Structures are given as structure tokens and as C-alpha cells.
Amino acid sequence: MEEARHPLPPFTLETAKQKIQLAEDAWNSKDAERVAKAYTIDSEWRNRNEFIKGRAEIIAFLERKWAKENHYKLKKELWCYHENRIAVRFEYEYQDAQGHWWRAYGNENWEFDALGYMQKRYASINDLAISQSERKFI
């Protein structure tokens, strides 16, 4: 059995914000193994048009993602929370292999188990081409 990943549900305003900051920090590390440890073994994701199940698929997905997204920088913020669920608004920037800059905007719906692991993550994301001078996250 795995150890609890605090903060645990049911979430308060403070603990929901803590969970979001932990996720933001992990994703900005671009360490796929570190990120995957926050999810249940059989976690279910929808990320854009991909359906991902389990930590091994999460790791493979993140490694592919970050191999293509250079200078990746993410910011997440709380939208709302209730019991074991959190909704997040986010944006991130990256540079593609051709040197073009992008900003991705999106929303995530998260559901956690009793031990604080994310068991469901549903992400809707849109990309916007930006110029280097339009970057927010430098």
C-alpha cells in the first residue's frame, strides 16, 4: 500500500491551493517519474485527444511531450474545489523544434482518492502561436 500524499481530501481553500502548487512545481521540473508518482497506479487521463491509463503511460506521454516542448514553463491556478475534486485553469509556454513560441491555455478537472493520489485528470487545451516578445513566463 502506498503512503498518503498530503494534502488529503476533503479539500479546503488552503489545501486545494497547496495541491495545485505541488502539481505546478512537479510539472515545471519536467521529471516525468516525479510527476507520475502523484497519480494512482491506474489513473485515467484525457489530455487533448489522448486517453492515457496508468503511471507507465503517463511517464511515456510526459517524456514525449517534453522532448518536443523546449523552455516549458507552466502556471496553474485554482478555479474551484469540492470534497475530493479540484478544477484548475492553467497556461504554459514552450518553444517547438522550429523555434516558434506557443502558449497553451486550458482547464483540468482532477479527482483524488482517499490517500491524496489523483485518480482522474481530464484536460482541455488550446494552443496559441505567440512571438518571443509576447512571452509571459521568462
Image (cartoon, rainbow, N blue to C red):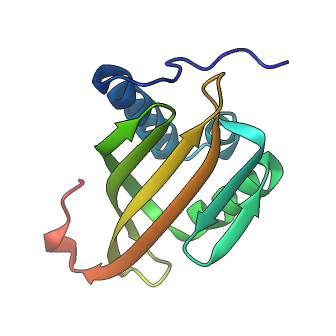
Q: Position of residue 134 (x, y in %)?
A: 15, 71
Residue at 43%, 35% in the rendered image: 25
Q: Position of residue 135 (x, y in %)?
A: 20, 65
| Placement of 108 over or under 118, stated as above or below | below
Please give left or right for residue 104 compared with residue 59 in the image: left
Q: Residue 98: horizontal and vertical position, in percent?
A: 45, 85
Q: Residue at x 31, y 49 (%)?
A: 75
Quarter location, residue 58: bottom right
Going 44% across and 30% down the picture, which residue do you hit? 19
Q: Quick check: 84 left or right of 102?
A: right
Where 106 falls versus 17 (above or below)?
A: below
66 sits to left or right of 137? right
Rendering coords of residue 35 (x, y %): 61, 40
Quarter the N terminus occupies:
top right
> Which of the 4 quarters of the picture holds residue 62?
bottom right
Q: Residue at the front extreme? A: 83
Pick the front one: 59 or 76:
76
From the viewer's perspective, is residue 107 above or below residue 24? Answer: below
